[in-house]
């Protein structure tokens, strides 16, 4: 049961109220009804509807709820819905028939005796329940007495609920706003025992008599004896009840469909979130693999540099080594193109594929020369830059058809397409890169056998090392998420470390954001005289405006 709110204003408001005795009998399909009394100016409730339709059950339910609340017993109602039953005293009822031969009481006189006692005991905050008020006598006089009794009870501040079949009492709600009307539902010739607030219920006497198996001839004759207006009114009310039930059924179906659609929408949202998470995990895995490749390349560069530092080398070997380093950087960029997420970001930054850095074939050591029919990209600046062409003739300058036009181009003016599934030439280019890269480590190991003049080499090596301009994790200061002062301290620490390691260039990662941090850092660099020689935005391949490239002054440590 539900523990209702209890007040002293004479209010009853319960959703899906059910008679406790019907529940105790464990009957199946006990119908709940919404019952309201005493809200706003509503002091009286007029219950209408067919005989055997449940009017008296609602009347008794109100009395039982009033007594249950007084004894602290929870009431049967709709779960998780607020309910209210105020404290009534006294609870007075006229339900049943008191006629008695011994006491010389007729049906009507018995009702009148009860009504007299009700009037004598009723006062403010009383609950009065009266069944078939005004019955048992001439209908016109019975209605007059019933209405006078109701008005007297309401004037005393009582809350009143009655049942009736009198049309004049049913219409009270339209003329006196202290009354509300409710009707018991009757559909398809049978009662549903559900109370419908605001509805005036028809008595359906003939339908009830037919359901109780009164002889059909009697039913037909009674129908003939009805006046035309009453018969048509009854048929109209039945049709309206049937249509109302159909509308309610459709509304219930729509409500179920709406709930199903909301559930489906929630399920689709969850599925979308799951797919987005899956894509995010895939991008993270993609980034992790790419980072691992970058670390491998960085380690290879460090091995080359360490070998050069430790053993000494000729100017030619140093120059070749820095050329190898340049190819390593280009190789990393090429691998980045083969990762969809990275390629997409590069395309977004550049606007089109033609603006991505292309590697001339002449700069790729050990790569195969293009053959007739191979696809190449034009890397010569001009209107054909980045466009694909087909090699037609070989020679010192190759004849390449680009966009239907034959042009003469040298090996330094054409490049193999990036490895994105374009064709066999692309695969040959990638294989050439891989072969070239695998030889680089071996060449770095052989550098110590080419030393010519150690003193000269050390000087050349130092100058070459200071000329390193490629961005790596080691020479980059990450200021993302830092304040300007924190960024300044980080930069000064990096300047000192760069001086010890003889680096000539470092990079400051500040991102784009609102641009305030970038502006402050660059303004400070413009006034820094001890370490900074000059600075500018990083090359597009190194991150562009998201980073600042700082060239450092050479410091004399000894």
Image (cartoon, rainbow, N blue to C red):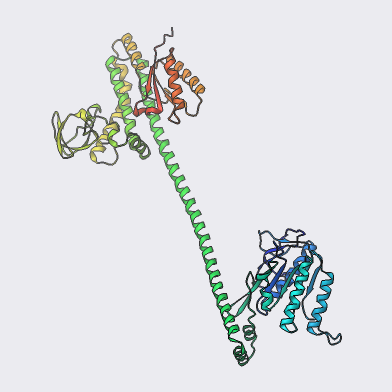
Pick the front one: 371 or 412: 412
Percent of width and height locating residue 195: 65, 71
Q: Residue at x 46, y 26 (%)?
A: 516
Q: In screen coordinates, is 228 left or right of 504? A: right
Name of the residue lying farthest toward the top: 558
Q: Tell me if residue 306 comes above or below residue 347 in the rendering.
A: above
Report if residue 113 is visible in the image.
yes
Q: In screen coordinates, is 516 left or right of 159? A: left
Name of the residue lying farthest toward the bottom: 217
Q: Residue at x 41, y 11 (%)?
A: 555
Image quarter (top left, top right, bottom left or bottom right) of the N terminus: bottom right
Q: In screen coordinates, is 373 left or right of 474? A: left
Percent of width and height locating residue 317: 28, 18
Image quarter (top left, top right, bottom left or bottom right) of the C terminus: top left
Percent of width and height locating residue 457: 32, 12
| Image quarter of residue 540 | top left
Q: Tell me if residue 186 comes above or below residue 506 in the rendering.
A: below
Percent of width and height locating residue 170: 67, 75
Q: Tell me if residue 165 comes above or below residue 511 in the rendering.
A: below
Q: Residue at x 33, y 16 (%)?
A: 464
| Image quarter of residue 475 | top left
Q: In screen coordinates, is 456 left or right of 119? A: left
């Amino acid at each position: 049961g539900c523990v209702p709110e209890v007040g002293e204003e004479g209010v009853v408001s319960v959703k899906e109220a059910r008679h406790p005795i019907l529940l105790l009998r464990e009957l199946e399909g006990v119908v709940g009804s919404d019952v309201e009394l005493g809200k706003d100016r509503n002091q009286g409730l007029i219950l209408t509807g067919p005989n055997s339709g449940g009017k008296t059950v609602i009347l008794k339910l109100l009395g039982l709820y009033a007594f249950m609340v007084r004894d602290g017993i929870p009431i049967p109602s709709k779960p998780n819905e607020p309910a209210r039953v105020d404290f009534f005293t006294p609870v007075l009822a006229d339900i049943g028939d008191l006629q008695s031969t011994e006491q010389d009481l007729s049906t009507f006189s018995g009702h009148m005796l009860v009504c007299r006692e009700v009037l004598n005991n009723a006062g403010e905050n009383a609950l009065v329940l009266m069944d078939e008020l005004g019955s048992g006598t001439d209908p016109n006089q019975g209605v007059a007495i019933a209405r006078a009794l109701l008005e007297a009870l309401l004037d005393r501040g009582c809350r009143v609920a009655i049942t009736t079949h009198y049309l004049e009492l049913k219409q009270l709600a339209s003329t006196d706003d202290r009354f509300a009307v409710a009707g018991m539902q009757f559909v398809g010739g049978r009662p549903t025992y559900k109370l419908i607030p605001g509805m005036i219920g028809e008595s359906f006497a003939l339908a009830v008599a037919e359901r109780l198996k009164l002889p059909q001839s009697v039913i037909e004759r009674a129908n003939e004896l009805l006046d035309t207006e009453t018969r048509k009114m009854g048929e109209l009310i039945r049709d309206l009840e049937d249509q109302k039930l159909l509308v309610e059924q459709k509304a219930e179906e729509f409500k179920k469909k709406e709930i199903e659609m909301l559930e489906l929408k929630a399920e689709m949202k969850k599925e979308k979130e799951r797919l987005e998470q899956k894509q995010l995990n895939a991008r993270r895995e993609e980034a992790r693999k790419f980072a691992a490749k970058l670390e491998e390349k960085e380690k290879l560069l460090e091995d080359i540099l360490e070998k050069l530092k430790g053993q000494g080398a000729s100017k030619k070997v140093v120059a070749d080594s820095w050329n190898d380093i340049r190819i390593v950087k280009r190789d990393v960029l090429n691998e980045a193109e083969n990762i969809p997420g990275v390629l997409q970001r590069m395309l977004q930054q550049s606007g089109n594929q033609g603006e991505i850095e292309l590697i001339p074939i002449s700069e790729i050591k050990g790569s195969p020369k293009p053959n007739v029919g191979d696809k190449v990209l034009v890397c010569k600046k001009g209107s054909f830059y980045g466009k694909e062409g087909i090699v037609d003739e070989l020679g010192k300058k190759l004849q390449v058809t680009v966009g239907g036009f034959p042009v003469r181009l040298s090996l330094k003016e054409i490049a193999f397409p990036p490895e994105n599934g374009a064709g066999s030439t692309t695969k040959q280019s990638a294989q050439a890169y891989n072969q070239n890269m695998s030889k680089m480590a071996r060449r770095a190991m052989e550098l110590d056998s080419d030393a010519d003049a150690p003193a000269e080499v050390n000087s050349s090596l130092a100058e070459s090392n200071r000329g390193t301009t490629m961005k790596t994790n080691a020479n980059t200061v990450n200021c993302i998420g830092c304040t300007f002062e924190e960024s300044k301290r980080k930069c000064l620490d990096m300047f000192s470390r760069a001086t010890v390691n003889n680096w000539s260039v470092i990079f400051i990662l500040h991102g784009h954001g609102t641009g305030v941090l970038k502006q402050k850092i660059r303004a400070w660099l413009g006034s820094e005289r001890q370490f900074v020689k000059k600075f500018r935005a990083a090359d597009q391949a190194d991150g562009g405006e998201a980073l600042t490239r700082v060239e450092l002054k050479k410091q004399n440590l000894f």
